């Protein structure tokens, strides 16, 4: 299992984590080694059908892991003048100074 | 203790001892603040409390009102929690004095207390070595005699491993025995608050106080607090299982000798000893290092510079603020685990890693159930494969560092109680032996630990 620099950068973007260019080679090398090490669990056969083990009170159980649509008639981008990457874009606070609010 | 003047004397003596232990870098609370807080608490402590006047240090990932809670991280520098952990509130209600916050690996991710933003903690017997981790500060303070007990936290052995390396007792309770309210989340399905103590009794007394139901934590079982067992005269009637997978051919020979000596003592105490098999043990560390980073990547998403701690300015937009704050605020090990966790949860890899690891966890838990179903009361193993290692020795080799938890992670994956007690020394360095018990049968586990502690030559060479 070899993790490329591009994959590290992609994962870092998903994790909202800045990774410097200098840190990339070591990080990619260490992640590759760790992933190679943990992948040995795939050598264990016939674990399909095994129910996940959840410690704690019996009442505590996982919900089904499924993607559901957001129950809005219109997407949030239709509700604001500017919307990007899941965020509403608003003026910087300084822009309000002196404004008649 | 019978009156408040004794609590005040205890507070002052504890502060003096903590000052003496300062060279270990085990306590993160400044001395002046610590003295003041200890005296204030002693004046308010209720003399009828079962822990009246007992100083208890608290790992820095457990929320307190008196002190900052930084989790050993720059991203929470100077952070003060607006509430305190249930475990801390219970200690104070029992008359204990919170004796400062202890150093730890950042967000409890590590096995050496070298991954703290506030510098590494030194081993109390040999400053060139590590005290273990992540609760290394708590272990070092107890071993140095600064406090009789301290709270730590466990996700994969972070109480028992440093306890073993420092020659003190470390207890990890059953998952759900102690409330996690106010314990900063790392791997929520694995995390438990645990106790380090200079003796089984000191640790057990503290555990009894912090255990029990808590409506604020849905993962805390609706049970009464733990009742302490009596110290048994013998281990007659106990069946102790020795899992062969915990004694590999390359185990340090002195660790093996120490465990063999403990087994001989069990037999002399009247216990039956039986070899058992836990066949999925070899997969415990890989399983853990998929599940724990996956949970961590989700739990640590909240540290974004907007809600907690310092903000490292990103100029462009809110995303840049998040990325810069997290990139600069987290240390190398935490960054690595967040990336690993995000990777194994991401589309295309989820089934191969996360789902498979969940199945492996179930198989590991089943191994324990099988052993206990065959009449074994407790399991006995080494706590760690070797004594304390040199500082820096494993810093650049994450897999080697992770393997120092090889004998402890299984109890966390299976949610079982476990205790490490000192069983001997190797060239002056402590080694520990571990009992793993059945869920919510901490009393049985403590009985065996009491009995072994009474007879084992813990300060002699193995």
Image (spheres, grey):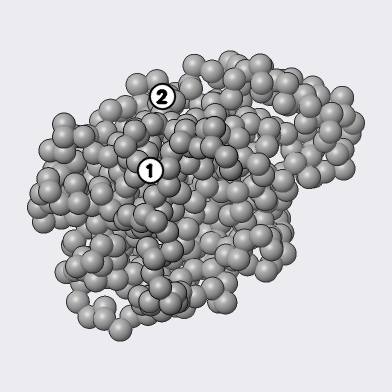
Quarter of the image for residue B105 reads: top left
Q: Position of residue B169 (x, y in %)?
A: 54, 42
* Chain at tag 2: B
Element at label 2: loop
Q: Give me the C-alpha separation between circle 1 and circle 2.
A: 31 Å
Q: Look at 34% across and 33% down and name the residue there.
A: B315
Q: Look at 51% across and 26% down and name the residue there.
A: B26
Which quadrant, please, contains the N terminus of chain B? top right
> Looking at the image, is B318 positioned above or below residue B214?
above
Name the outermost residue toward the right: B3
Q: Position of residue B65 (x, y in %)?
A: 68, 37
Q: Which residue is mark 1?
A: B318
Q: Position of residue A55 (x, y in %)?
A: 49, 68
Same chain, marks 1 and 2?
yes
Name the outermost residue toward the front: A100
> Looking at the image, is B429 positioned above or below residue B213?
above
Q: Position of residue A65 (x, y in %)?
A: 37, 75
Q: Could you tell which of marks 1 and 2 lies nearer the N-terminus?
A: 2
* Chain at tag 1: B
- What's the mark number on residue B119? 2
Contact (CB < 8 A) between labels 1 and 2? no
> Around disc 2, counting alpha carbons within 10 Å, would you say few (fewer than 14), some (14 to 19), or many (20 or more)?
some
Residue B366 seen: no
Q: Look at 40% across and 73% down and name the residue there.
A: A74
Residue B218 seen: yes
Residue B386 shown left or right of residue B157 in the figure: left
Element at label 1: helix
Quarter of the image for residue A78 reads: bottom left
> Looking at the image, is B246 positioned above or below residue B424?
below
* Of the pair B58 and B184, the residue shown nearer to us: B184
- What's the mark number on residue B302? none
* Of the pair B435 and B26, the residue shown nearer to us: B26
């Amino acid at each position: 299992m070899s993790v490329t620099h591009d994959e590290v950068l992609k994962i870092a973007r998903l994790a909202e984590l800045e990774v410097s260019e200098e840190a990339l080679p070591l990080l990619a090398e260490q992640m590759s080694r760790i992933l190679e090490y943990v992948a040995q669990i795939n050598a264990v056969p016939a674990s399909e059908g095994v129910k996940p083990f959840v410690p704690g009170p019996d009442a505590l159980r996982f919900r089904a892991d499924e993607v559901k649509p957001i129950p809005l008639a219109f997407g949030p981008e239709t509700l604001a003048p500017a919307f990007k990457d899941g965020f509403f874009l608003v003026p910087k606070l300084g822009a309000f100074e002196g404004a008649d609010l | 203790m019978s009156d408040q003047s004794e609590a005040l004397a205890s507070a002052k003596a504890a502060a003096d001892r903590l000052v003496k232990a300062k060279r270990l870098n085990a306590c993160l609370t400044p001395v002046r603040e610590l003295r003041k807080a200890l005296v204030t608490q002693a004046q308010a402590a209720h003399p009828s409390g079962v822990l009246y006047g007992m100083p208890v240090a608290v790992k820095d990932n457990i929320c307190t009102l008196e002190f900052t809670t930084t989790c050993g991280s720059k991203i929470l520098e100077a952070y003060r929690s607006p509430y305190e952990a249930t475990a801390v509130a219970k200690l104070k209600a029992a008359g204990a004095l919170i004796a400062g916050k202890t150093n730890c690996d950042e967000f409890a991710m590590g096995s050496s207390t070298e991954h703290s933003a506030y510098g590494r903690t030194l081993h109390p017997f040999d400053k060139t070595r590590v005290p273990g981790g992540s609760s290394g500060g708590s272990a070092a303070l107890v071993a140095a005699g600064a406090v009789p007990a301290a709270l730590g936290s466990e996700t994969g052995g972070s109480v028992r491993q440093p306890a073993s390396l420092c020659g003190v007792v470390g207890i990890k309770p059953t998952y759900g025995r102690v409330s996690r309210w106010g314990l900063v989340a790392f791997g929520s399905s694995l995390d438990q608050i645990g106790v380090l103590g200079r003796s089984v009794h000191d640790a057990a007394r503290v555990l009894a106080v912090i255990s029990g139901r808590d409506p604020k934590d849905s993962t805390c079982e609706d049970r009464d607090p733990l009742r302490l067992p009596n110290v048994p005269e013998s281990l007659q009637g106990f069946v102790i299982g020795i899992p062969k997978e915990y004694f590999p051919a390359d185990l340090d020979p002195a660790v093996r000798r120490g465990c063999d000596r403990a087994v001989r003592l069990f037999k002399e105490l009247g216990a039956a000893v039986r070899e058992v098999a836990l066949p999925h043990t070899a997969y415990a560390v890989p399983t853990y290092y998929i599940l724990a980073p996956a949970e961590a990547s989700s739990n640590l998403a909240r540290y974004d510079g907007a809600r907690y701690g310092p903000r490292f300015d990103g100029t462009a937009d809110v995303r840049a603020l998040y990325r810069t704050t997290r990139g600069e605020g987290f240390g190398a090990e935490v960054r690595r685990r967040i990336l690993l966790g995000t990777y194994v949860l991401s589309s295309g890899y989820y089934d191969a890693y996360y789902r498979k690891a969940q199945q492996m966890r179930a198989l590991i838990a089943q191994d324990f159930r099988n052993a206990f179903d065959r009449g074994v009361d407790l399991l006995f193993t080494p706590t760690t494969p070797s004594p304390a290692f040199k500082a820096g020795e494993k810093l650049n080799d994450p897999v080697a560092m992770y393997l120092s938890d090889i004998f402890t992670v299984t109890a966390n994956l299976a949610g079982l109680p476990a205790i490490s007690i000192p069983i001997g020394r190797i060239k002056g360095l402590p080694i520990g032996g571990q009992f793993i018990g059945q869920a919510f049968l901490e009393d049985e586990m403590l009985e065996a630990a009491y009995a072994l502690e009474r007879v084992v030559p813990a300060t002699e060479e193995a």
